Image (cartoon, grey):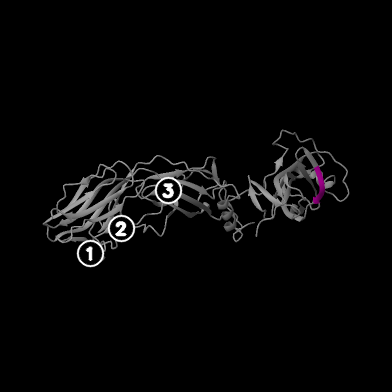
Amino acid sequence: MPSVGRIHKLWVLGIATAAVGANASTASAGDVWLWACQGPAGQPLGGSPFEGSGFADGCDEAGGVLRGELTAQDQTERRLRATVPPGTKLAKVTLQHTVGSGALYTVTAPTNEQPLGPLVNGEQTLPVSATAGGGELKLSLKCASSACENASLAVGKIGLNVVDDSKPTLAVGGVRSPGSDYNSSTARYDLPMMFDVRASDSGSGLRRADILIDGAVVAGAAFDGDACPAEDLSPGSPQVDLALGAQCVMYDGVQIPVATTAFADGPHTLEVRVTDWAGNVGSWTPSAPWSILNNPDLGSPTATLNIGSSGIVEPPQQNPSPGPGGGVGGAQSSSCRTPRLSVSLDSKPLRISKRRPVLLAKKRYRFEGRLTCVVNGKRRSAPKSTRIEVLNKVGRKTVSKPATRLRSGGKINVLLKTPNVSGSRTLIFRYRNASGQRSQVSIRVTITKRAPRR
């Protein structure tokens, strides 16, 4: 049985069929605040996301203030610009600034290239009429006249409120039905499924992916990347505040393990959701029904009885002559009334596919079971050496194989070697007594020549 790690790699690489989709549910648009120099609470952010010249070295590392000065001898205009993330729409600009006398200070929004204003000292929030995504926010400082002296500007907070109305898209690998995998250490099908979630976003960036089973979140993971700190500057606030210039990842992948043992065997609903920083949600669901199988049935433990269940009437008892050695056709066969046979696969198969054990060609597999009869009104183990027929059915053709005989306690213990041929077949174990009553068990298996990868 291949390990879960190898199986998951097969799913991710597409060697096994992976469920892949990019369908996304409807999600309402959200907004994000992007801050420069200082955060929403005045905390210094350090560094500068601006490009240009004339404003010293950008935002002061200690206090988070952007400074620019002009004199009468230097009338060159100071300019800075900050890029608005593509895929978003700028809606508002918050500024905390102090402008010295004699300075002409303008802030120009992207797309319409019209200065925002009027600008006043202190903190103010200005609406923006921009309708398209992306572009640059421009800050400029110059002398109002040729006579200006010591014109200056000090900018603290710079906040851009951007609207993101695009939901992420995603593809999901590693999904299989039924969901579970064989664990050699526990000899159970209880290894977790590994979901490989790949997502992209064209706006504020990817935040996290979540796995939902039956409508409840059961596992999740945050997207990560060198360009995004994945940190909200105001975690207690209902709004999302990020540093301007720290572009969150637009494309990333995460692997999320989900333990299936927490759920009952049978059909379940599955959904994978990806959320961006603006709160937009993209979702994926499998196109086919999805189920969980932690405890597969490796063979029918219940006998298929003709007596009582198929309408066959038991003929009256006779006194047949005992056959050699007893068993079927012997003295015990007539006394084994209402036979009940159970047989199941005792060896570990390669895997379970469509509720059938998959067996490797040219390998021996052990089958175990038991035959019981009603003797003197009580159900007892069938006599030792009772003969059990073994048949192979391929398509419409049924071939008899060498029979086996019961051990003490009515037990069956037989090794069967699979043929060197691939395909499906049915193994039939059958007991028939002298009166014509019979009980049989049919086990459908699939044989493959392909050995597990190591």
Q: Is residue 124 visible?
A: yes
Which element is circle 2 on?
loop
Residue 240 locus on image (x, y percent) = 31, 52
Name the residue tied to disc 2.
49
Q: Earlier in the sequence, mark 1 or mark 3?
A: 1
Three-letter amino acid code at the position of disc 1: Gly
Which one is in front in this view, the residue at disc 2 or the one at disc 1?
A: 2
Label 2, residues with CA under 10 Å away: few <14, some 14-19, many ≥20: some
Which one is in front in this view, the residue at disc 1 or the one at disc 3?
A: 1
Q: Earlier in the sequence, mark 3 or mark 2?
A: 2
Q: Is residue 339 visible?
A: no
Three-letter amino acid code at the position of disc 3: Val
Quadrant of image for the N terminus: bottom right
Residue at the spot x=32%, y=42% of the render?
A: 132
> What's the magenta region?
399-404
- Name the mark on residue 63: 1
Name the residue tied to disc 3.
274
Residue at the spot x=21%, y=53% of the render?
A: 95
